[in-house]
Image: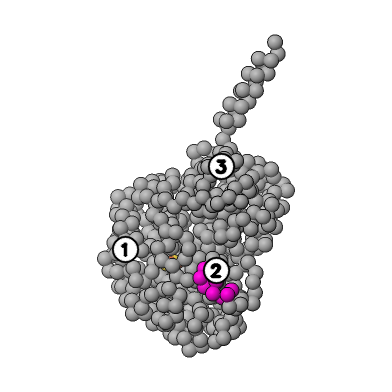
Amino acid sequence: MMEPMIHRRYISVQVKVLLMKKKVLLLNPPARKGVIRDYYCSHLAKGNYLWLPQDLLVFSGMLQDDCDLSVIDAMVMPLSEDKTLEEIQSFSPDIIICMVAAVNWRSDMRFLSKLSQKTSALIIVSGDYSRIYPRQVLTENTCIDAIVLDFSHCGILSYVFNPHSDSIVNIMTRESMHEEIVAVNEACSYPPPRHDLFPIKRYHLPHIQCHPFTTILTTFGCMHACSYCPYERIPFKLRTIESIEQELRSIKSMGIRELFFRDQCFGSHREQAYAVCRLFEEVSHPFSWSCEMRTDKADETLLKAMKKSGCHTIMFGVESASENILRKHNKNISLQRTKEAFHLAKQLGIRTLAHVIVGMQGEDELSLQRLIDFCIELDPNYVSFNIANPAWDTSFRDALEKNNKIFDPKIEVDHSIGQPVWESSQLSARQVWEFRNRAIRKFYLRPTFVIREFFGAKSHYRRKMMLKAGLEVLLNHSV
Ligand code: SF4
């Protein structure tokens, strides 16, 4: 007589288990330095700024309906390792989706190993190095259960609901690691991310106009293939306009006005860029925004449409002042075209940032001197002076490895504030580093520049951020 009762109780437990939402934690783990881990390009922050980890933001949209979600961004809070572990234990997740980064690799792996001893949750990671070498990472780090290979694809959903399914795509699991990788490269579409789950007021960027801000993606990967760039081999895809519109409306409902586009090259797909500009008008909210762009895509019609829809700052990749060097690195843009783009943006009242790379293959002392003169001639509002360190999975890195040029083969390669890990016959690592620091001082300590930027800043927030970022850059890289 007892049997049917036990059976009923068993069934009801099963139903309860099915109905119970999985507890999923989105985690940006702690680190000592300002580590920026997102979107397959990790680096160390040059100043006091951080933005929302884009991978986690996208996952928050995909998982919100079917999971009990929580977010811990230990970088921005900031939280110590112990405090982070304590908070994780108190949430008691079934699954932890954690950012990891090449620039902080050993430290991230140590933390995950500690974490796996304190929780029975499955640990899945998303990051640059793990995406490139998933089998090796799974083999060397038994604390990791799976690796996301494309965060813009909803493969994460099938993994969360059935980690043992054999139809999971764009995720490498421990079970599937010896099989062929199944990758799907279709237009991305995901529900509006849960920006509200992130500690939004804690994120800062020196160039934004209104605080708080958030980030958004309208395309994924890049249509171009510059040989030094982490996006060289990441296939390009569009995000559907419907999906972008839903996210803009959701951000509007939170009262947020400022957006930082995480697209690697806004405007490369022209129809998408115009469609996004039109969306801003349709959504009808006073958004102001900034983005990354190639100078050869910045023509007057597109820049006018961008300005009209609220774009206030464009970050252009300038890289070098030598057309020869640019060509060698598969960036075929003339210096004249670059000058025109900066001029045009300035005429339209759009602020500019120039990304430059110090010490690319083929540079010598003379061409580096021309680089700083070129930066001053372009007259942007910011210059980001980066080091030509070889990012993982690039043709540039392949060439250096082939010729045994890398003297420091560690995983933690940083192009932002990291010391050079290779040298050429024209320039030693020390010369590159010293030039970079000299260039920062020469560009930023011009009295006309300081007066224009500091006293011309329209808000107290902007002045405060500029002062902080400026002081940090100068103190950290003065000699
Ligand atoms: S540098 Fe810019 S344009 Fe070139 S591959 Fe990278 S993201 Fe694309």
| Quadrant of image for the C terminus | bottom right
Q: Quickly name the residue at label 2.
A: 391
Please indicate whether residue 297 sits to the left or right of residue 417 in the image: left
Q: CA distance from mark 1 to mark 3?
A: 47 Å
Residue drawn at (42%, 50%), measured in percent from left and top?
186
Task: Indicate the position of residue 11 as horizontal and vertical percent values.
Answer: 61, 22
Q: Residue furthest bottom?
A: 366
* Mark 1, residue position: 307
| SS category of the residue bearing label 2 | loop
- Circle 1 residues within 10 Å: few <14, some 14–19, many ≥20: some
In reply to whether residue 103 is colored magenta, the answer given is no
Question: Looking at the picture, does residue 206 appear above or below residue 380?
Answer: above
In the image, residue 347 sits, relative to residue 169, either above or below, namely below
Horizontally, is 148 left or right of 106 in the view? left
Spot the residue most to the top: 1
Q: Is residue 309 visible?
A: no
Q: Which amino acid, by three-letter code, is at mark 1?
A: Lys
Q: Which residue is mark 3?
A: 166
Please state which of residues 417 and 231 is positioned toward the viewer in this rendering: 231
What amino acid is labelled 2 in the image? Ala
Tell me which secondary structure the magenta stretch mostly adopts.
helix
- Tell me the magenta residue range: 394-402
* Real-space Cα separation, disc 3 to disc 2, in angstroms: 32 Å
